[in-house]
Image (cartoon, helix red, strand yellow):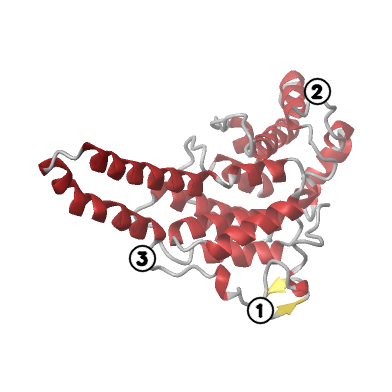
Amino acid sequence: MSTVGSRCSLPSQNSCYPSHTVTGTELIALPKELRIEKRVSNTVRSSAGTWLPVALLAPFAFMAEVVPAAIGILLVIGFTLREFRRSRTNVLPVLEMADRGNIEEATFQVAEMAKKERDWHRKSFLIALLSTFELRAGNRANALVLARESVRHPQDKQPVLTRSLKANLAMILMLDGKPEESLDTLPGEPTPDPVTDTNRMLIWARAGRWQEVADYKHQKLPDMQGLRHNNRIVALLKAAALYHTQGGVLKIQRFMDEARPTQAEEYDYLKADWPELNEFIEAHPELKSRRNILQRA
């Protein structure tokens, strides 16, 4: 199983989570850098900083017909928007890193991003992402603390983010042995939703509701960087559900082919304390071996 190592060690070693008290590997209190506080966000500040010179300078530019000044203002807007786009997409390389099995470095980088982020909406997303990396590293207690922090402030004006954060918390609660709280936390109706499908199917499967998993018409995520692990999890759950509900052999094989891991230990964090899934994986050795170099593209 992947573990958080030298660069991003267990919390007791104060690498990713400095200045807090721990018992074993459990976070008792999050360091202040990873606590989410509602405040005037960087986005608001950057917008104000962008539009203020526009409001002040644009009239003079047009009155004096100084075209270069107007162009300069537009360039300021362009650069600001470019930086905003970068701030929203810089997690993709980290997701790809985790997809390749380097959970240690991915955890370190996301922790650093989260500690520096001042926009509380994006910070919530980064804390949730950090919780999934801790989950995959086998640190469920830490994952749960982080997932609870990610939903501490309601995201009333961000419905997609809200569903994502709650579904992530619900999944971790279920894997941590809290089924009732998990099902109460799981958002929305059971209709195809790419934001919550993986979490919903995993929760149903862990609860032994294999028929619902087998019948569920999920929306497959794009086969792109950072999302392939989720797609493999869904394929694994579909294969296991069909296996437990006497589904067709060809369908089971198709999903098992899609679920072939990139790392031998990729599913270890799911197998722990889950006898049915562990039994299914043990019965199919191809789910314990890495894809060959062509399959891993």
Looking at the image, the residue that sits furthest to the bottom is: 21
- Quick one: label 3, few (<14), some, or many (20+) residues within 10 Å? few
In front of the other: 246 or 48: 48
* Structural distance between the alpha carbons of marks 1 and 3: 25 Å
What residue appears at the point 53 percent right and 44 percent down from the top-left corner?
89
Whether the residues at callouts 3 and 2 have beta carbons within 8 Å, the answer is no
Badge 2 marks a residue whose secondary structure is loop
Amino acid beneath label 1: Ser
On residue 160, the disc is: none
Q: Which quadrant is home to the C terminus?
A: top right
- Write down the residue under mark 2: 294
Does label 1 or label 2 sit earlier along the sequence?
1
* Structural distance between the alpha carbons of marks 3 and 2: 48 Å
Does label 1 or label 3 sit earlier along the sequence?
1
Whether the residues at callouts 1 and 3 have beta carbons within 8 Å, the answer is no
Is residue 269 found left or right of 71 in the rendered image? right
Is residue 82 found left or right of 71 in the rendered image? right
- Quick one: label 1, few (<14), some, or many (20+) residues within 10 Å? some
Looking at the image, the residue that sits furthest to the left is: 63
Whole-percent x, y for residue 217 in the image: 55, 30
Badge 1 marks a residue whose secondary structure is loop
Residue 182 visible, this orientation? no
Amino acid beneath label 3: Val
Single out the mark in the foreground, 3 or 2: 3
Badge 3 marks a residue whose secondary structure is loop
Look at the picture and state if 179 lies above or below 214. below
Residue 142 visible, this orientation? yes
On residue 19, the disc is: 1
Amino acid beneath label 2: Leu
What residue appears at the point 34 percent right and 58 percent down from the top-left corner?
44
- Write down the residue under mark 3: 40
